[in-house]
Image: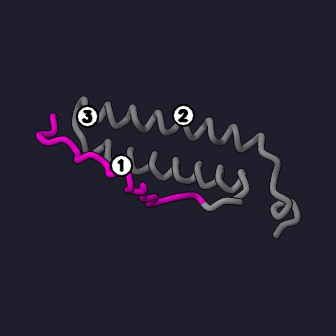
Amino acid sequence: MIKPTPNPPLDCNDVPVVLLSVKDGIPTEDLLVNLTETLASVHALTLDFAFELDSSRRDGALGVAQLIEVAQLLAERVLEGVEPSPEIEMGY
């Protein structure tokens, strides 16, 4: 779809607005755990959605679900190589 009107030019004085960000200082292990949980959730939602579709659209959604699963496997592999946080080792 071609947009009928272009976006207005940005004013040089406009500062980009950050809507979401990740707090500094979060341990890598915690970030990776959250990443894998998020990917698992998105994978489940995509599969649920895919089975409501027909034919090629279902195939496309299942392809997206498979790519999400690959990303989850990669994140889990990285997580395996991360040293546990001291809090986790001590059982806190």
| Residue 70 badge | 2
Residue topped by disc 1: 48
Q: Is residue 55 left or right of residue 64?
A: left
In the image, 38 versus 43, the foreground residue is: 38
Determine contact: label 1, label 2, CB under 8 Å.
no
Question: What residue is shown at x 37% (from left), y 35% (from top)?
Answer: 62
Secondary structure mostly seen in the magenta stretch: loop
Does the segment drawn in magenta span residue 39? no
Question: What residue is shown at x 57% (from left), y 41% (from top)?
Answer: 72
* Few, some or many residues within 10 Å of mark 3 (<14, 14–19, 20+): few
Q: Is residue 1 left or right of residue 57?
A: left
In the image, 55 versus 20, the foreground residue is: 20
For label 1, the SS is helix
| Residue 82 badge | none
**47 above or below 13?**
above
Residue topped by disc 3: 57
Q: Disc 2 marks which amino acid?
A: Val
For label 2, the SS is helix
Q: Can you tell which of label 1 and label 2 is closer to the viewer?
A: 2
For label 3, the SS is helix
Magenta region: which residues? 1-22
* Few, some or many residues within 10 Å of mark 1 (<14, 14–19, 20+): some
Q: Of marks 1 and 3, which one's residue comes earlier in the chain?
A: 1
Q: Is residue 80 left or right of residue 35?
A: right
